[in-house]
Image (cartoon, rainbow, N blue to C red):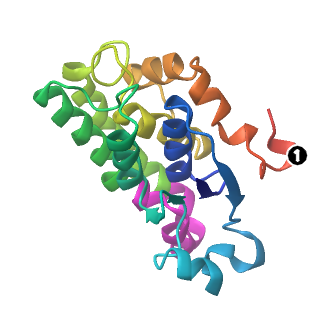
Amino acid sequence: PILYSYFRSSCSWRVRIALALKGISYDLVPVNLIKDGGQQFSAEFKALNPMQQVPALKIDGITLSQSLAIINYLEETHPNPRLLPQDAKKRAQVRMIADHIASGIQPLQNLSVLKQMGEKKMEWAQNCIMSGFQALEQILQYTAGRYCVGDEVSMADLCLVPQVANAERFKVDMGPYPTITRINKALLELEAFKISHPSRQPDTPAELRA
């Protein structure tokens, strides 16, 4: 497999965690979203992913984009360890939380949106994350065990950790979100989350390396 990734992309990080958890080795091709006006806009990369976003994964003779679609494919082809619970209600909760982050928070503070916000980008990002986290904190009161849904790592957790990293980068006060903070801390102790971390990627700038 070949993963096209950017060290700081939260969507790429989700996929890196899934690959690490499932023990799938891969080659990484960095796509720098800032350099050269954004390498994702090159004709070469557009041919690979017409949406001109990372991640993209070449695997089993196909090319997939969209992090949750990639994770679902990995789940179906490499079922262990499972990232979607067997119980239908828990599985729905996992998907709900993953969508809450991947559709309801992350795109609103994505690089392409922030570019259009100009001087207000920090305030915009903070507001998007805070309103999303207020809802998520409430949801987790009902679903969380050690992790987002019960005590098993799931696709929801793969979305949570990169989003908390975004929140910290945009200087969001995490005080009002104790459940999110507790789960994030527990997940960051797991090896798959450590090795996939933005501070430990081949394309991580020297000053940001762990």
Residue 199 position in % (x across, y down):
73, 39
**Residue at image location 58% in from the left, 47% down from the top:** 170
Q: Quadrant of residue 29?
A: bottom right
The boundaries of the magenta stretch are 106-124
Horizontal arrangement in the rendering, residue 33 relative to residue 62 (left or right): right
- Please provide percent x and percent y for residue 73: 36, 49
Figure check: 139 above or below 199:
above
Q: Quadrant of residue 180?
A: top left
* The C terminus, quarter of image: top right
Q: Amino acid at mark 1?
A: Ala
Q: Residue at x 35, y 31 (%)?
A: 83
In this view, which residue lies farthest toward the bottom?
43
Left or right for 100, reference 60:
left
Instruction: Find disc 1 in the rendering and name its residue.
Output: 206
Tell me which residue sits at (55%, 81%) in the image.
Answer: 46
- Please tell me which residue lies in front, 169 or 162: 162
Q: Nearer the viewer, residue 156 or 114?
A: 156
Q: Position of residue 55 (x, y in %)?
A: 53, 59
The residue located at (11%, 28%) in the rendering is 89
Residue 107 is inside the magenta segment: yes
